[in-house]
Amino acid sequence: MVKVTNASLIISGANRATANVDWTISGINLENIASLTIDGQTVSQFSNQSSTEITLTCPDLSDGSYTLTGKTHSGADVQFLNDNATTTEQTVTVSTEITLWSGHHYVSWDKPDGDPNKTFGLIPMDVFAGITAGSILKVVYSIEPTAEYHQMKLATGWWTDLTDKIEFTENGEYTLILTQDILNKIQDEAGFLCVGHGYYVD
């Protein structure tokens, strides 16, 4: 069955945000969104809005879980895709952790060399130079639903493994304790990469 819809459907990026920081959400027909509401605070000003992405500043909220809803210009509810089902609300985890990078970057090692989406390597080495051993690195990811598989591995800029490869079938997060050995490798081997296939770094 093939369906055509003009409904605004948010597919990824809506499950996690950092208070007072730009928050980019992806989907389809997002140009029709008039407002998004989280914990009773309605945002109708967006720094970027297209058919596939919308960027807003997350309200000043304490750490915790909140409900996100939205309305289109026609007054219809914004739809959210979770586990292959659509709903009219989304649970968002708001955190005040230090964010090293935020956005929505696709990763596939099937891409040719030189393609920006072959890897994720957008965190500068000097950021890691200021991190102390024992800190926890958290990579938030969302799946690309059309990809045939979803795998991720954390590596140095030379593709030296920092972790075992993980496979997943739903959005989530991966944590790594940054030992001094790992931090040294990142400095010695041209930085930090997320590699793999079929997912977005969020």
Image: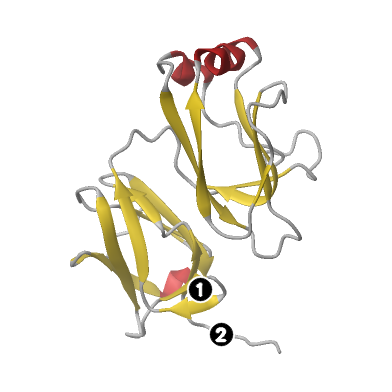
Q: Which residue is mark 1?
A: 29
All told, the count of numbered labels is: 2
Task: State the residue at coordinates (20%, 51%).
Answer: 61
Is residue 35 something that shows in the picture?
A: no
Q: Amino acid at mark 2?
A: Thr
Find numbered disc 1 in the image and state the secondary structure of the residue it sits on.
loop
Find numbered disc 2 in the image and state the secondary structure of the residue it sits on.
loop
Which label is found at residue 10?
none
Q: Amino acid at mark 1?
A: Asn
Compared to 186, does 47 lie above or below?
A: below
Instruction: State the image coordinates of residue 200 (x, y, percent, origin top left).
Output: 59, 50
Task: State the residue at coordinates (63%, 26%).
Answer: 162
Viewer-proximal residue among 10 and 62: 62
Crowd around label 2: few <14 · some 14–19 · many ≥20 (10 Å): few
Task: State the residue at coordinates (38%, 72%).
Answer: 33
Instruction: State the image coordinates of residue 134 (x, y, percent, origin top left).
Output: 42, 21
Viewer-proximal residue among 135 and 23: 135
The answer to whether 77 appears left or right of 64 in the picture is right
Crowd around label 1: few <14 · some 14–19 · many ≥20 (10 Å): some
Is residue 16 something that shows in the picture?
A: yes
Q: Earlier in the sequence, mark 1 or mark 2?
A: 2
Instruction: State the image coordinates of residue 122 (x, y, percent, origin top left).
Output: 55, 32
Compared to 151, does 80 lie above or below?
A: below
Q: CA distance from mark 1 to mark 2?
A: 9 Å
Task: State the residue at coordinates (43%, 53%).
Answer: 24
Q: Quadrant of the N terminus?
A: bottom right
Instruction: State the image coordinates of residue 14 (x, y, percent, origin top left).
Output: 42, 60
The answer to whether 64 appears left or right of 84 in the picture is left
Query: CB of mark 1 within 8 Å of CB of mark 2?
Result: yes
Compared to 65, does 132 lie above or below?
A: above
Q: Which residue is mark 2?
A: 5
